[in-house]
Amino acid sequence: MFNGIVEEIGIVDALERRKNLSVLKVRACKVLQGTKPGDSIAVEGVCLTVTKKKKNILAFDMMRETVNKTLLGQLRRGDKVNLERALKAGSRVSGHFVTGHIDRVGRVEQRIVEANYEELSIRLPKGLGKYIVPKGSVALDGVSLTVGKVSKDRFSVYLIPFTRQVTTLGVKKKGDPVNIETDILAKYILNSVRG
């Protein structure tokens, strides 16, 4: 479990493709502290298990499902990725509860930049609209955000300067993919109402 508050931006060192498995290697600093094999780290919002830790490199095994259903399979050496260690019991939750289980990959439709204002408009993948509501929570590439405007085929989020500086969302441009995780509470509520 995570809270969508990125601790640092890591750098992809390698993405090794093997039969039915890919190994992602990421250079990091802060998230290395206290991390050991078996621990969970959110990489671009995807919950991955650390399989090896060597100097400043963390290695993660990714199953075919993860590679196919998230943007992690598109990463290349040198790409920047958002990193967050799992929550500790008793810690403050600064964002919202994020599981690291991606619902879909969306695309940036538009980026509006004005003085002290930045808005990302995201194409709403089919089937996710029921979980995206104005003022609700969403995680994009592992970043906890508040939903702004919502229409039939897109939704918007707003980035404060700090978020632009300390996450990969600051460099996203039109057409770029984003991992989308909708609010887990919305999923449970909707499921209980249907049930």
Image: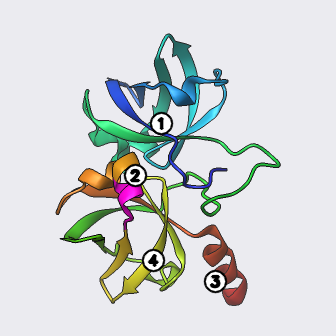
Q: CA distance from mark 4 to mark 3?
A: 18 Å
Q: CA distance from mark 1 to mark 4?
A: 30 Å
The three-letter amino acid code for the residue at tag 1 is: Met
Which residue is most to the front? 115
Residue 147: mark in rendering = 4
Disc nearer the start of the sequence (4/3): 4
Instruction: Give the percent coordinates (x, y) of residue 10.
Output: 40, 32
Instruction: Give the percent coordinates (x, y) of residue 91.
Output: 76, 49
Write down the region rendered in magenta.
159-164
Residue 69: mark in rendering = 2
Foreground: disc 1 or disc 4: 4
Crowd class of label 3 (few under 14; some 14 to 19; many from 20; radius 10 Å): few
Q: How many marks?
A: 4
Q: CA distance from mark 2 to mark 1?
A: 10 Å
Disc 1: which residue: 63
The three-letter amino acid code for the residue at tag 2 is: Lys
Residue 167 visible in the current orientation: no
Q: Is residue 126 above or below residue 56?
A: below
Instruction: Give the percent coordinates (x, y) of residue 194.
Output: 67, 88
